[in-house]
Amino acid sequence: MKNKLLALLITACMIFALMPAVAGASDMPVEVKSVEIKLAIGSPTLTVNGTTSTIQKPYKQNGTTMVPLSVITKAFGAGLKLENNKIITLSYNKTTVVLTIGSKSVKVNGSPITLTAEPKIVNNVTMVPLRVIVSAFGATLALNGNAITIKGFKVATTAASTGNNTGGINSDAGKTQVGDSYYNWSMKYPSDLVMTYQNDNGTITEWSSVAEDSKIAIFIEDVDQAYSHEELRDYAADYFASDEFAVEKKTVTIGNLSFEKIISKSRSGWYYEYRVIQVDNRIYMAASGVKSENKDKLNGFQDILNSFKPSFAKSDISLKDITKVQNGNLTVTDKDYGLSVKLPVDWVRVKDASFPMFANKNGLMSVQISSLKENDTAADWMHRMRQKLENSFLPDYLRNVSESSMTLADGQAQVLGFEYSYDKKVWYKEYDVFFAVAKHKYELDYLYVQDGTAKGESLFTSIASSIDIDTNFVESNFSDLDDAEHLADLTVTKTSKKYGYSIGLPESWHGVDKDFEEDSVFYTIPFGSVGIDTFEETSTSDYINMLRNFINSDDNMKKAGAVIKETTTTTVGSGISATKIVVDFPTDTVPSTTIFYIFEKNGTTYLINYTVNQSNNTDSNRAAVEKVIGSFTFTS
């Protein structure tokens, strides 16, 4: 009784403390409407301004009335944010209420309050304490036995119709449907779930329960072919986990729409339902999942899946637009790098990249951060990169090199522009943007395939003007970061005990196959590749004959136009006699030249070969690789 009385006194104090904030609501750029909510303990009926719907039955625990979270979000238009799958933040007007699943502690505008009952998950529905939230929102609460009447205000902010997604339910008063106006789909709102994921361009959106035991997801993909019924089923199966298998496959008709349906089960205890439909060149897939011992629990999502349709009614005020696409562009963020940039909708994140990288079929953009050395400047950095560029390309493959400056959101930047080609047929335009702030330097690289239009130039201007990096975040979270410049003059000696040799490699080279106890190692370099191979019980003369026959007879060699340009005797490393064979590949996808050094010791043939793009076959590039080959030494 003492705890209950204390809670009531605290709540009463909160009502008076919050009254000025509610009274000032008319000063905000919002539309405020009165709302009357009626519900009852033990009853599944909810009435909001005379409109009736069904909810999970409210109940009492330790004197606290617990109601579904959707009562708060729907009736009041409260914003909802979920963190770590258990911390719920409700925002309404100028009030913020933070609750935690399983905790009796709640914060109202930062002030802690102790409840007598904690929020919890009941039958996959999040149940929250009614009085403390409603009182914090400045509404009145009247009790008559089990009947509850709430009177307050429903807020619809002007931002509600912008289509911007904030990661949670935001200003959803009166919203009973959700969809995407750009990708043209809609369905009933999964009100008891929280949006937990949406990818950069909005082609994948997922809602989950707070307990993470149920979910709804929508997948969109544009394709260039019509899919058969079986291909649509295969499309769904491509999303299966490694331990997932189908238990039902069939075609279902909902209204005038025909879907391919698959129900699957995973050995980790989940059941899933997938529904796939193709409209013109776009595939839509709506999916649900539940963690359950039987698939009957999927029935709880049938109403939502049945409501899915590949259309979006822009005039329907009950439909919430969660599109990320505005005027054909989307704002992409990378929180780990403090990055925000606007890109066309067809650009996607390169997932395997260790730094922010985005691409479409004709272009690529990346951002890299490294440490700024003492007394270095962005202008000096750009000049070094220009010298490196001009040393790396033959004159016929590089043109229109220029230097300029531009103003970004983060300050003044230096711009190195140039055009290059690997075959003198397809030309690329690249801009490397350099700027420095405090202890770090930033490089934005943008390139595109030239097509004779100004689209690429226009897009560069658009991207550069929109890019924004939180340099304060970088200074706080990034420390010393050496870049490739730092590694350029460093070498490491690699040794093979099994094959008895060592060689000094630049630390800037990237090892693909780098176990020197194996018979083959392979490294990529900025303008080609380098490999070392060993062939036991194969003589040098036998290998040379096999190589010549392969070059002259293999179909792929013929397509690449392979021709042996030179065969000479030379020395490798510390006076090791070797046969040198030079082969040109003028009609390969990227025309190139490969140099083979072949020599023998104790019955084992050694092959060192390097390939350099013909566009990059400069004296300086060849000299860099030949220097490495010159370090080859037998150790036994």
Image: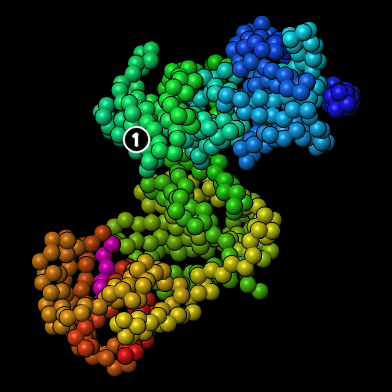
The answer to whether residue 106 is magenta is no
Q: Quadrant of residue 594?
A: bottom left
The percent position of residue 217, horizontal first and vertical second, equals 47, 31
Relative to the observer, which residue lies in front, 391 or 576? 576
Q: Residue at x 70, y 11 (%)?
A: 40
Is 600 situated left or right of 390 in this image? left
Residue 596 magenta-highlighted: yes
- Could you tell me the amino acid type at mark 1? Phe
Residue 284 coordinates in the image, percent (x, y): 39, 28
Whether 528 is drawn above or below 344: the answer is: below
Nearer to us in this view, 467 or 296: 296
Q: Position of residue 393 (x, y in %)?
A: 37, 70
Whether residue 320 is visible to the viewer of this picture, yes or no, is no
Is 399 left, or right, of 53 in this rendering?
left
Identify the residue at the far front of this view: 1
435 with respect to 452 (left or right): right
Work out whether residue 476 can be spotted: yes
**Is residue 630 positioned above or below 58 on the image?**
below
Residue 595, quarter of the rendered image: bottom left
| Residue lying at 29% horizontally and 88% vertically, measured from the top left | 572
* Magenta stretch in the rendered image: 590-598
Q: Residue at x 59, y 12 (%)?
A: 54
Q: Split into 4 quadrants, where in the image is the N terminus? A: top right
Q: In the picture, which quadrant includes the C terminus?
A: bottom left
Query: Would you name the residue on which mark 1 appears?
Result: 245
Q: Main secondary structure of the magenta part?
A: strand
Question: Which residue is pictured at 33% across the width and 29% down the height?
Answer: 247
Depth order, front residue of 93/152: 152
Give how far across and how far down residue 244 sits, in percent. 37, 37
The quadrant in which residue 501 appears is bottom left
- Assign a secondary structure to mark 1: strand
